[in-house]
Image (cartoon, rainbow, N blue to C red):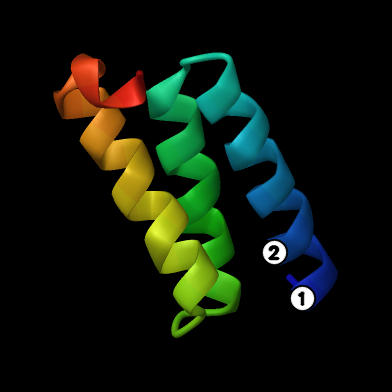
Amino acid sequence: MNRGEASVSVMLAIFYLEMKDYEKAIRECLEAEKIKPHEPSIQRLLKLAYQRKWSPDASR
């Protein structure tokens, strides 16, 4: 995998978050994290996906 694939996973994660498909968003974040493990934007996106998964009211 390369850095471009991490960008695709991040874009997909954002799309899935907007569609409220939190499981898929988390999966894409974890894929991106494998490629760029210390990228703060990926960590923030992953945190947001978990927050919305466990607390649907947080997505408002």
The image position of residue 26, as x and y in percent, is 41, 40
Mark 1 burial class by Cα count in 10 Å: few <14, some 14-19, many 20+? few
Place residue 55 in its image quadrant.
top left
Badge 1 vs badge 2, beta-carbon distance below 8 Å = yes
In the image: residue 39, left or right of residue 49: right
Relative to 51, say whether 23 is above or below.
above
Q: Is residue 1 visible?
A: yes
In this figure, which residue is indicated by the disc labeled 2?
6
Name which residue lies at 26% across and 39% down: 50
Look at the numbered disc 1 and give the secondary structure of its residue.
helix
**Residue type beneath disc 1:** Arg
In the image: residue 9, left or right of residue 30: right
Relative to 39, say whether 34 is above or below.
above
Residue 46, disc: none
| Closest to the observer, 4 or 15 | 15
In the image: residue 18, left or right of residue 44: right
Spatial CA span between label 1 and label 2: 5 Å
In this figure, which residue is indicated by the disc labeled 1?
3
**Residue type beneath disc 2:** Ala
Mark 2 burial class by Cα count in 10 Å: few <14, some 14-19, many 20+? many
The image position of residue 44, as x and y in percent, is 40, 61
User: Which quadrant is the C terminus positioned in?
Assistant: top left
| Closest to the observer, 23 or 46 | 46
User: Which quadrant is the N terminus positioned in?
Assistant: bottom right
Name which residue lies at 30% across and 52% down: 47
